[in-house]
Amino acid sequence: MWNISDEVKPSNRAHVQSLKRKIAAACPPVLPKKRLSVIHRLNCFLQLWLLKIIAATYFFVRRLFINSPFAIRPTLVKRYTCRLTLEVRIFFPPDYEGNSRSLLPLYFNIHGGGFAVCDAQIDDRFCTSWAKRTGMLVVSLNYTKAPLNPFPAASYDIAAVIKEVLEDASLPVDKSRVAIGGFSAGGNLALSATQLPWLKGIIKAAVVYYPIVDFSHPPDVKLAAKPYTNSPPDTLEKSSWIFDWGYVSNGQNRRDPLLSPCYAKREDLPPWIYMVGAEWDMLRLEAQVMIHHLAGLVNEEDPMVDAFEKGNYKWTVAKGCSHGFTHDLGGGSPDIQKRRQTCEMIYQEAYEWLERSVLGCQDGK
Ligand SMILES: *[C@@H]1O[C@H](CO)[C@@H](O)[C@H](O)[C@H]1NC(C)=O
């Protein structure tokens, strides 16, 4: 159906080796997006707009009738002049005293949704508990969506709003302790926006959950190379084609590091990175290869392990979980209790890792 690469149905091992070699290349060859057949595009157009309408209706109704419980509402909702249409949701840690002069470390959160759907509101629960757990000021960002705003619009939205938040004197922010993170497409955007020149060096750490980091391999190649069997159907099996259609324009270089951060140079990314992959996720392998590469585990024989921490880089595979598990999406363990425990464990690890990376270093070390 889609013929953008030389590898037709690679084995898992061959796929990993080829991805390793490509991201290690000093300058991976340009891979422009090809225009696909009219039928394919029409199909994607209809499906993506249908999905967007359903999602927008869902959020509209939810806002009207189901006011989110008081306990997970943001402390503040603001808009910044650079992007007046994009609401910014701000969560203070519960023990913060309004009149205190202490400055808080800052965490930017970016929601997922295939670059095309959802709203920052879906992360309210996470943001509330993350602010409580870490004592950080959590700022949850919205961004413009595909297909009307394809790549790189969202990266620039995120970077522009971050800049204004950092300049906002009304927020008690310690600018030497800033981290970013996101889920799925939001994880991609976290690794993309931080490469933009005016954010480089400002954001010390990124925590990304099941991100897409490689747009240069089509979904069928990723599905064929997935390193697991006997899993529930992949959350993204059907939708990755339509998200790709909406987000990546014809002619766009699929190996642009802003689009596919696995091709970014180490020094262009935040100096500390923690990646969390879901075991049953067709996107797990690319994140796994990227983080192994960043940590210097680059030899052909180096196995892809399920968890490591080496230098500034950390990796965890959430066992028995699918893409979207943190938000109770996707198949995977039918046991919600177990999935929640996995989330709890991972969030705690992420927090402890942040303490070692950004939170501990007062005074801009
Ligand atoms: C979030 O961004 C989308 C896409 O631009 C926009 O349609 C929506 O109104 C925004 N929502 C809020 C609450 O800012």
Image (cartoon, grey):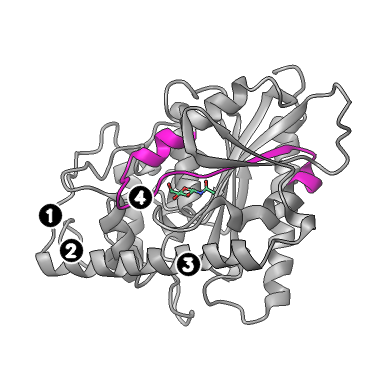
Compare marks 1 and 3 and give the one earlier in the sequence.
1
Q: Nearer the viewer, mark 2 or mark 4?
A: 2
Amino acid beneath label 3: Thr
Task: Choose between 36 and 57: the one closer to the eye.
Answer: 57
Q: Secondary structure at mark 3?
A: helix
Distance Cα–Cα, label 1 vs label 3? 31 Å
Q: Give the farthest residue toward the front.
A: 64
Q: Which residue is mark 3?
A: 57
Upstream in sequence: badge 2 or badge 4: 2
Does the closest atom of ligand 1 sit within 8 Å of the Cβ of label 2? no
Residue type for callout 4 = Asp
The answer to whether marks 1 and 2 mark residues whose Cβ atoms lie closer than 8 Å is yes
* Mark 4: secondary structure: loop
On-image quarter of the N terminus: bottom left
Quadrant for residue 237, please give it: bottom left
Q: Circle 3: is it few (<14), some (14-19), or many (20+) Cα within 10 Å?
A: few
